[in-house]
Amino acid sequence: MHTTKRKLLLFGLGYFEQRLLEAVSQQWDTIAIDMNEEKIARLKKELQGVEFCVGDASSILTWKKINTQEIVHIITTIHDIDVNLEICRIVREVLNLEIPITVVSYALQEETRLAQYNVTIINPMQLGIGFILNRLEKNYVKAVDIGLRKGEIIEVPILTKSHLVGKTLRMLKPTRWHVAAIYRDGNMIIPSGDNQIKLKDRIVLLGEPKILENVASILLKGDPQFPTQFGSTMVYPAAERYDRNADELQYIKEHIKAERLVGYPYRASMAKRSDLENNAEKKTYEMCPPIKSLLQLFDVQNDIGLIFLPYSNLARVERLSLKLFMKKAPAPLVLSRLRFPYETVIASLNCPDPAYALELGIDLSRLFKIPFSALYVTMPKALSDSGEEDHLKKRYALIADFEGIHKRKIPFATREGNPVKETLDFLKAHHNSLLVVVYDKAARFSVFQPHIQHHIAKKSLLSTLLVPIEAVYES
C-alpha cells in the first residue's frame, strides 16, 4: 500500500535560513527552494536527505515541480513582502491548500497585509529584543508563539529575594490568574494546592497580562503589591454625603499600589470639587457615568483591585445589603468607618484560609508601615472537640512559619468563646486599626449557620477589609 510522505516546504536559504534548514531537516522530510544555483549545489553536499529545487517561489512554474499533496507545512523566509504575498496567494487561491504557513519576516508592516491569508508571522528581531528586554527589565519571559501572544502566559524564576519561597500555592489564592506548571530540577510538576514554591523553581503562569506582571513582581521581589494581584483600579461611589470618607479614601490610595482611582457618581451626585481637582492633577482620577445602585459598582469593569465603600455614611437600608456586597464582590472590599490613620493591621484568623489572611495582613502592614497582629477565637472547651484543638495548633504553626519567612515577631492573641462576640470585644482596645477578614464567597448565609465573617464585618467599629476567596487547587 502506497503512503504519501509528509513534507515541509522551505523557501529562501540565507544564513539564518540555512541554520533553520539544518534543524528542521533532522525531524522532517524537507524540500528547500532558492533561486541561487551555487548555494543549492553547495548545500546538497552538506545536507543529506534534503530535496532541493532551484526556482522562483512566486512563479507557478516552480510550484508545478512540487507534489503539493505531500506538503503539511510551508515556511517562507524571503525578505520581499511582495514575494511572500504571492506565495500565500498561490497556496490559498490557486492551489486551494489550507495547510499552515509560517512567514519569517523582519518587516513589521507584513502582518496587516498577510492577515487575509491566515498565516503565522515570526519576527526574529522582535523576539530577540523582547526576550532581552524582559530579562533585563523584568527577569521573566513571555510566551511569544502560543496563545494570544499578549503576555497571558509567562515564566517566572523564583529568586532568593522572594519572600514567597516555602509557601504553598493554596496560600497565593490566585484571582484571574493560575499557576499552570512548576519546573524543578529538570522535571515538570502539574501543581496542586499543596505544592510549595521553592528556590530556583521556574513557574509558568496563565492569566490576564496586566495581572501577571504584578504577580511576577511579587514572586521576583517579594514586594507587597496589594491590590494589583486582583486588579489595578480602586473604585468608589462619589456623592456629597460621602465627603467625610474622602480623606480615608485618599489615605488608602496613597499607601497601596492601585494605579487608578475611579469614582462613580451615586444617584447623579458629585464628589467634593477639591477632590476632583487634586486627583485630576495626579492623573489617578476618572469620573464615570452615574450609578443608581451600589451593587452596580461591582460590575463596572474587569480591572477592579479594590472597592471602597463609605460604610459609616451609608443609609441603613444600604448597610443591610452587606451580604449581597460580599456575595457579589469580584475583589477585596474595604468598609470605611473613618478609623484612620491606621495604627495597626489586625487579621482575624476565624476564617476559611488563615494563611491567606496572614499573608495579606503582613503585606498591608508593610505598605502602611505599621505593626501587624492576629487574633483567633476558639469555641468554649465545654463545646469544643479535638477538631477545635487541631485548628488552634494549625494557626500556631502558621504563625511560626510566617515569623520564620518574614523574620519578624507576630503578636498572636487567642480567646475562648463566641467568635463574633470575643472578636468585637478584643477590637475595642484598638481604636484606629484596619481589620482584615477573609471569607468564602460560596458560604451560605443562614440563621442555622451564622456567617462569622459577615457578623464581624457588620458589627465592627473599625475600617474593615473584606477579602473574598474561592476554592482553587483542590486536587
Image (tube, rainbow, N blue to C red):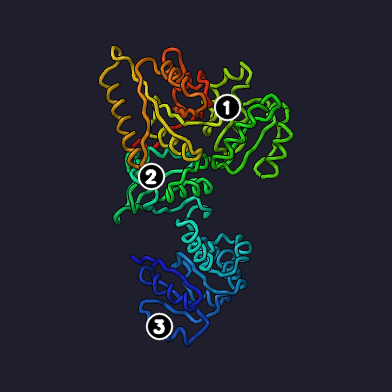
Quadrant of the rendered structure where residue 315 is?
A: top right
Kindly report the distance in space between the C-alpha atoms of the residues bearing marks 2 and 3.
55 Å
Marks 1 and 2 in Cβ contact (< 8 Å): no
Kindly report the distance in space between the C-alpha atoms of the residues bearing marks 3 and 1.
76 Å
Classify mark 3: helix, strand or loop. helix
Kindly report the distance in space between the C-alpha atoms of the residues bearing marks 1 and 2.
30 Å
Q: Is residue 246 left or right of residue 23?
A: right
Quadrant of the rendered structure where residue 78 is?
A: bottom right
Q: Which residue is mark 3?
A: 44
- Looking at the image, residue 64 lies above or below residue 385: below
Classify mark 2: helix, strand or loop. loop
Amino acid type of the residue that numbered disc 1 sits on in the rendered structure: Ser
Compare marks 1 and 2 and give the one earlier in the sequence. 2
Q: Which residue is mark 2?
A: 164
Compare marks 3 and 1 and give the one earlier in the sequence. 3
Q: Which one is in front, 292 or 402?
A: 402
Amino acid type of the residue that numbered disc 3 sits on in the rendered structure: Lys
Question: Residue at image x 59%, y 31%?
Answer: 308
Question: Residue at image x 58%, y 26%?
Answer: 338
Is residue 99 at least partly visible in the picture?
no
Q: Is residue 241 left or right of residue 25?
A: right
Question: Residue at image x 36%, y 65%?
Answer: 3
Question: Measured from the top left, where is residue 60 in percent x and y?
Answer: 57, 75
Classify mark 1: helix, strand or loop. loop
Q: Which residue is mark 1?
A: 336
Question: Measured from the top left, where is residue 43 in percent x and y?
Answer: 41, 82
Marks 3 and 1 in Cβ contact (< 8 Å): no
Q: Which one is in front, 232 or 281?
A: 281
Amino acid type of the residue that numbered disc 2 sits on in the rendered structure: Leu
> In which quadrant is the C terminus drawn?
top left
Compare marks 2 and 3 and give the one earlier in the sequence. 3
